[in-house]
Image (cartoon, coloured by chain):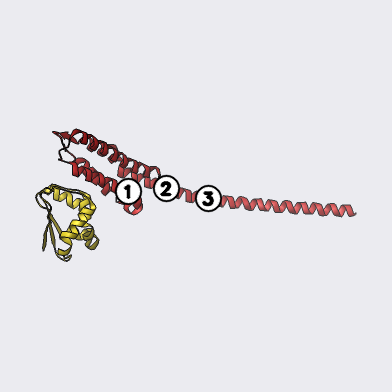
Chain colours: A red, B yellow
Amino acid sequence: MFVYILTNMTQKAINETSLTLELLLSILAIVISIGSVVFEYFWNKKINKTNLEADFFKDIYRDYLMNKLPNARNVILYNNRIISATDDLINVLNDIRRSSLFYKYKDKKFYDKLCKQLQDLEDELVNKTDETIDYDDFTKFVNKINLDIENIYNTIMDKYIGKK
Amino acid sequence: MITITLEFSKNETKLAGFPYGRAVYIAQARDNIKFNDEITIIFPEQIEQVASSFVQGFFAEIVSIIGYKGVGKNITIISKSDKLTDSIYKNIY
């Protein structure tokens, strides 16, 4: 009799434990489902925002980087020891600066860095245009211009790939 | 109407640099400007090129007081050529 009662009580305890465990697992499954939905919502929102910004970015810079900047750079002349035909490149640098105004309010750090690079290069071009310089100085000038343009490309591309 | 003719050394034909633009504004324009008046700024004939950095240094305080719209409305720029004048206006932005 006693064994029978004991067996019954043990069975009951096991059943209750099993029930509690099942309940816990069900609650956990619901929580995970809701969590997944919430996570997916915020993740998609972030992806959409990133994609939108990437679209803006491409719209702003694609033509400058692919066409206008390299073509304007190629036009610069050195004849009779005088540098000329820098207007195109100066105009493109200013166009890039004005086109970047969106980032003055979206990412001021990037905007300030890019503007400084653009205007430092412009200052160099303005100061050297129509100046008489020897070939060695012209070589240094060309190397500096190329390096400055490379840095501008790097600043813009680093922003695009999300590198700080 | 206020007219300000900027003065530079004879061999200076190009203007560049934000600090230089601001220094010229402080030395030659700031005390003569009344912002409720029309203002004409004359760049002398010898000046052939003006970098955007100079323009922004020179006009920084003016823009902060009367805004870009005010600049467009009240400021007249005269320089050696229409092309240069146009470039100076555009580089205020």
Q: Mark 3 points at which residue?
A: A37
Q: Name the residue under label 2.
A: A48
Is label 3 in a helix, a strand or a loop?
Answer: helix
- State the image quarter where residue B3 is shown: bottom left
Q: In which quarter of the image is the N terminus of chain B?
A: bottom left
Relative to A125, residue B56 above or below? below
Q: Which residue is drawn at 37% across and 47% down?
A: A53
Q: Nearer the viewer, residue B93 or B33?
A: B33
Q: Where is residue A81 in the image (x, y as percent from the top left)?
A: 15, 35
| Distance (Cα) linking label 3 and label 2 | 16 Å
| Distance (Cα) linking label 1 and label 2 | 26 Å
Query: Which mark, residue A113?
Result: 1
Badge 1 amino acid: Lys
Badge 3 amino acid: Val
Is label 2 in a helix, a strand or a loop?
Answer: helix
Q: Which of marks 1 and 2 is nearer the N terminus?
A: 2
In the image, taking residue A7 as reference, residue A118 lies left or right, namely left
| Distance (Cα) linking label 3 and label 1 | 40 Å
Relative to A93, residue B35 above or below? below
Q: Which residue is drawn at 18% across and 58% down?
A: B25
